[in-house]
Amino acid sequence: MVTDEPVSSEQLAGVLDQPEQTVIGTLESLAREYAAAGRGFELRSVAGGWRFYSHPACAPAVHRFVLDGQQARLTQAALETLAIVAYQQPVTRARMSAIRGVSCDAVVRTLHTRGLIEEVGVESETGATLFGTTRYFLERLGLASLDELPPLAPLLPSLDEVDDTGAR
């Protein structure tokens, strides 16, 4: 549940310090148990790994949730990440995470799903995906172009406001 890619049984076995065949057996057993119980999620073996998915019968509710979520306010983390993309674009997830000091993967997915950011290329040195803001972002902020974003310098604290520890 904490990864956005299928996790191999080999990797899970390593993390759990268990034989891979034991892990595979447990995963298969859990998948059968979840299916028999009619849970709202499934555990599936896909693309060389295992991953949780919402149950197909729950698709209408999941769809409504995702669409309703697009109308919800952005979290502080999402706003911070969106500001990083707006001012630093094109920017990689790694750079966003480095600036914020925490992983931005879930927030990037949310912003992408809401149509506020998009993939704009690939960094030549690392092959990492580069992100930028969308026309929808400009529309939602009432801007004609990124040139209308306010400059950052006036929003930053002055040197007098920053003490020796770097706190305000």
Image (cartoon, rainbow, N blue to C red):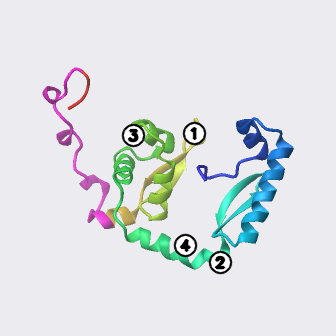
- Look at the image and say whether residue 116 sits in the magenta stretch: no
Residue for badge 2: 57
Residue for badge 3: 100
Residue interval drawn in magenta: 140-164
Question: Going 26% across and 65% down the picture, which residue do you hit?
Answer: 142
- How far is disc 1 from disc 3 in space, using C-alphas? 23 Å
Of the numbered discs 1 and 3, the one sitting upstream in the chain is: 3
**Amino acid on which the number 3 mark rests in the picture:** Arg
Q: Nearer the viewer's eye, disc 1 or disc 2? A: 2
Residue for badge 4: 62
Packing grade of label 1 (10 A; few <14, some 14-19, many >=20) is few
Q: Quadrant of residue 96?
A: top left
- How far is disc 2 from disc 4 in space, using C-alphas? 10 Å
Q: Nearer the viewer's eye, disc 1 or disc 3? A: 3
Above or below, comparing residue 167 to residue 107 in the picture: above
- How far is disc 2 from disc 3 in space, using C-alphas? 37 Å
- Look at the image and say whether residue 150 sits in the magenta stretch: yes
Residue 85 in picture, x, y percent from top left:
39, 49
Label 4 secondary element: helix
Residue for badge 1: 124
Above or below, comparing residue 134 to residue 90 in the picture: below
Q: Nearer the viewer's eye, disc 4 or disc 3? A: 4
Of 121 and 118, the residue lying toward us: 118
Residue 18 in picture, x, y percent from top left:
79, 38
